[in-house]
Image: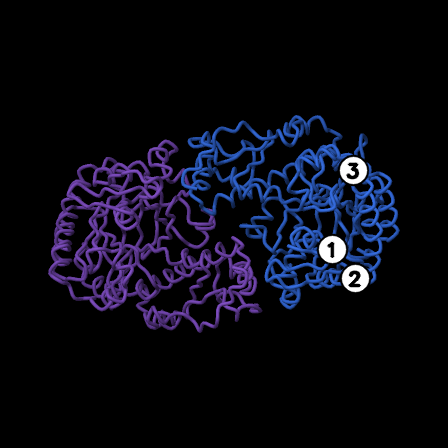
Chain colours: A purple, B blue
Amino acid sequence: MSGPLHFEISQTSPSCQARVGRVTVPHGSFDTPAFMPVGTRGSVKGLLPDQVAATGSQILLNNAYHLMLRPGHELIASLGGVHAFMQWDGPILTDSGGYQAWSLADMSLLGEDGIVFKSIIDGSRVELTPERSMEVQNSLGADIIMAFDDCPPSVDASSRVRDQRPELAAAHDGQIGEDHHQRLVGAIDRTARWLERCVASHARRDEQALFGIVQGGPSEPLRRRSAEQVTAFDLPGYAIGGVAVGESTEVLHATVRMTAPMLPVDRPRYLMGVGYERDLVAAVRAGVDMFDCVLPTRNGRSGGIFTTTGRLQIRNARFREDQSVLELGCDCQACGGGFSRAYLRHLFVSGEMLGPILLSLHNIRHFQRLMVDIRRAIRDDAWSSLARAWPVLGIPVADAIGPVDSPDLTGL
Amino acid sequence: MSGPLHFEISQTSPSCQARVGRVTVPHGSFDTPAFMPVGTRGSVKGLLPDQVAATGSQILLNNAYHLMLRPGHELIASLGGVHAFMQWDGPILTDSGGYQAWSLADMSLLGEDGIVFKSIIDGSRVELTPERSMEVQNSLGADIIMAFDDCPPSVDASSRVRDQRPELAAAHDGQIGEDHHQRLVGAIDRTARWLERCVASHARRDEQALFGIVQGGPSEPLRRRSAEQVTAFDLPGYAIGGVAVGESTEVLHATVRMTAPMLPVDRPRYLMGVGYERDLVAAVRAGVDMFDCVLPTRNGRSGGIFTTTGRLQIRNARFREDQSVLELGCDCQACGGGFSRAYLRHLFVSGEMLGPILLSLHNIRHFQRLMVDIRRAIRDDAWSSLARAWPVLGIPVADAIGPVDSPDLTGL
């Protein structure tokens, strides 16, 4: 392997842009298209590394923002890096910290140099710049690190306003006002200038693969402009950023379909923070190779179950006496272990930790089983069998939730 | 095996009453002296059954009180009993529910028929009688079930007053006032009358071994009176109850030393709710075979670590950069897995579930390693080697906590 990343495409789909491959980085290999569970603070919540591996996960994502603030990237470096820290021997990807710095802080200021924000830990003033993000990610030592980019909200100038008024955002989807257009153009050009600084300051080029990130919102000309700027740097991989920030499913899919082909065909393409099952399949068919999302773990902790036919809520009273496992045919540690829906409901209703643990194991395995089936669909060009095995792919995301009866929240 | 329990003593200590043996019940065998982790609500908090088994635990305890109230013993019976419910194939013991009914309820009334209390779930009025406790435990289907007894507090008439004023209780230890003597005598005689009703109403005698419980506080004549009454029933095992309810270590040890020999030598002896390492060794040397205690899991969830040299608190700032595992030479999944104290501290300081999980695994394994060493000490009559390998045994319980510096609770 020359350089920190080798990408081998073993097969491409004759009917779309999808491809099956394998990425090799210093800590091992992972099959693509790949789904990365999120271990925000150096832990996939509630799961030991061997349990995460047992879900079929081959690469994890950690958040540089959180680890920088606590326990600190210097401490993690002194302990041998994030692999040794969390005892995960396989590949790890860290994000740049920029997105969280912007979205989580009480107050953040964006300038040409970077972002200044108040720490969520102690309120102190923290500055994150391209150089600082590289320093943090170099210290953490992940196999793949991300460029520090300017990720504007999809429509509004403020992602917080947008998060609070999704109905307004949806109404505007696909229509970009002049002010927002200027914001997007500014973000694209700044992202390119910041990428240059990231490339210049990245200190471990032989050990860590730096990915550039394409911005541009839902606009094809803006995406093209950003892709041209970012791919002007010869990097081991490229990401599509600025999606799943509030836009509709249609806009999300359209954005991915237009942007993926703008990226070099021989480099892994990573779609950041996406998403539901049908989003993954749409993106794979557009030529995307890597995904991360908190959906399986975040939903699992609150009782949400992913199944091939849609989502369920384990607290529902109708599961009180249900002897069946979460999903027949699933080989996760919850279903394979024989734990009934009735037992899992009891754990959630009683506030027992084991409930979130077992649902997280199931949900991550659900996404990894989907990736296995997607890779098979690509190899066999068998997309209709995939659709038959995964009825949820035919259901709009908002509707992919099973019949809900009155939740029984006794004792919660 | 005739009857639901077979107890084989393979070796006895020449220097004390300790014995090594093996208990066989319908769901398998366990080595004695045995330590049972507690799975209050049908789950050892945060741990999958295979992780519990990996700690060396061969038998678990579940609380009938909690399972009766939620999800209900009838539901568990309809799902195939508590083994199928929680997917633990090995031996299980349930307590009678009496102790929790008395100690946890806002208001409980004790009468000749039983205890009436307000449910902690919904405030409804619940009655627990010897017959009802047997019905509940028969429904749950544990291998070993406990008689419904009257367990008075160690000194005061009210365990709640006692819990709130431990300094008063300690001052009184070993001295029984006339009122409390009458309460103890009443409890003993009632326990005997209730045992008769338990024996009469126990519906699954071929599948579940019913243990009687000896009460009597710290008084030898009262313990003898209770032991004579309880052992008048030919039962597969007997327990020492009414200890670890607030008395000093000295009184606890003296009570066990006087009571254990009053129980038949060929039946397993179970000391309920005990305790710290030195309490276990003292009780084993007095002839006790079985223990349960929440200490390893409850302490683990709040950051307490058991080691052979005493207890530690993982949140302490001095562990911030500590690369060592919790205890060198420990083979638990936390130490064997290579997780550093620095990482575990980070998990606790960050509120990550994995912290309580890993400390629970370590602490349960700590107690199981102690049991392995205790069984070896009995076989080899090597009590001084045991003391050398476990320095904590020579330290008073209250002092068995390592040097504590100012806890760093940043962000908690």
Q: Secondary structure at mark 3?
A: helix
Q: Which residue is mark 1?
A: B145
Q: x, y (%) of residue B302?
A: 53, 42
Q: Which residue is mark 2?
A: B202
Residue B410: name its quadrant.
Answer: top left
Query: At 48% across and 37% down in the image, what residue appears?
Result: B338
Q: Of the residues tagged 3 and 1, which is closer to the observer?
A: 3
Q: With A101 as the anchor, is B21 left or right in this view?
A: right
Q: Secondary structure at mark 2?
A: loop
| Chain hosting mark 1 | B
Whichever of callouts 2 and 3 sits on the residue coming sooner in the sequence is: 2
Q: CA distance from mark 1 to mark 2?
A: 10 Å
Q: Are marks 1 and 2 on the same chain?
A: yes
Residue B295: name its quadrant.
Answer: top right
Query: At 69% across and 36% down in the image, what residue appears?
Result: B168
Q: Is residue A330 above or below residue A183?
A: below
Q: Are marks 3 and 1 in contact (CB under 8 Å)?
A: no
Give the residue type at disc 2: His
| Chain hosting mark 2 | B
Q: CA distance from mark 3 to mark 1?
A: 23 Å
Q: x, y (%) of residue A20?
A: 30, 58
